[in-house]
Amino acid sequence: ICSFKKRGVAKTARVAIAIAMNEWQGYLYLESNPWYRYLDRCFDKKFGVDTAGLFFPASENDPRFESCYYYAPTSRCVFLYLLWQIQVNFRNFAFVDFGCGKGKTLLLAAELGFREIIGVEISRELIAIANDNVKVYLNRTGRDTRCQLVCTDARDYRMLPCGPAVFYFHNPFGEEVIREVLKNIERSLAAAPREAYIVYLNPQHRGPLDESAFLSPMKVTAWYSIHKASGSLATARNK
C-alpha cells in the first residue's frame, strides 16, 4: 500500500517485476535447480565422467576442513555465461579453480581453450575423482590441454601461473580462507603484474573482494561477481 502511494501503480509494478526477476535469476544459478541437475547428468553421460550431484567429503579429522563447503557442480550454461562476460582470448590465459571438487569447471575450461588449467582441492576423495574425470574427458574429446591437479589447502597454494589468469571460486570455503587466497594472488600480481580476473559464483563471502584495493568490480550481483585484478595497483600497494 505504501509503495502504491509513494510510486504509483506503474512504478510499483516495475519494482515488483524487478524483484521477481532478481529472485528468478538467482534460482538460475542455484545447484538445486532441477533443470541444471538434469543437464549435469546429461553432461556426465555424454563424456563418461562423474561430476553431477552434491558431494560432502570426509573431513579426515583435519581441522582445515571446518572452513570448507560441500562440492556442487557448475552447470555448463552458467559457466559459459560467466566466462564470456570477460571477453578475452582464453588461449592466452590460465584457469585456476580454487576448491575444484570433482573438476567439472576444469573440463569446461578445456572446452573454452585455456592454455593451462589448474584445480586446487583439499579433499583427497574429490581430487581422485577429478583426476579420473580429466583423464576420461581429455581422452574422449581428443584435447591436449595441459591440466594440473593439486591436493592442498587453497591457502597454501602459491605457485600461481605466471601469465594472465582467470581465478574461479564457486563458494568453496569461508571468508578467512578467501582472504588468505586473495593475499596470495595479490602478492603474485605485485611480483609480476599481469592481467587477471576473479569469477565468484554464489558469492557468500564477497566482502574481501570488494575491500581489496587491487580488484576492480566488473559485474556484481547477488548470485555472482566478476572482478578484474590490476597488477599495477598491487605493486603500488606493496611498495
Image (tube, helix red, strand yellow):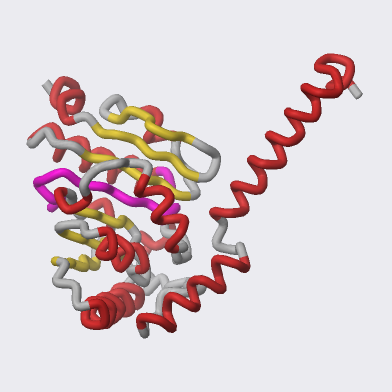
Of residues 51 and 203, the one nearer the viewer is 51
Residue 167 colored in magenta in the image: yes
Magenta-highlighted residues: 159-175
Does residue 128 appear in the picture of this structure?
no
Identify the residue at horizontal 39%, vertical 35% (top origin). Answer: 208
Compared with residue 12, is residue 201 higher up or lower down, i.e. above or below? below
Name of the residue lying farthest toward the right: 1
Determine whether, in the image, residue 126 is placed left or right of residue 33: left
Residue 140 colored in magenta in the image: no
State the quadrant of the C terminus. top left
Position of residue 104 measured from the top left corner of the image (x, y, whole percent): 37, 68
Marker count (numbered): 0
Identify the residue at horizontal 42%, vertical 54% (top origin). Answer: 170
Identify the residue at horizontal 39%, vertical 55% (top origin). Answer: 80
State the quadrant of the N terminus. top right
Does residue 13 appear in the picture of this structure?
yes
Determine whether, in the image, residue 7 is placed left or right of residue 70: right
Of residues 51 and 12, the one nearer the viewer is 12
Of residues 68 and 101, the one nearer the viewer is 101
Position of residue 145 measured from the top left corner of the image (x, y, whole percent): 16, 67
Determine whether, in the image, residue 112 is placed left or right of residue 12: left
Position of residue 199 measured from the top left corner of the image (x, y, whole percent): 36, 45
Position of residue 70 measured from the top left corner of the image (x, y, whole percent): 47, 65
Of residues 103 and 14, the one nearer the viewer is 14
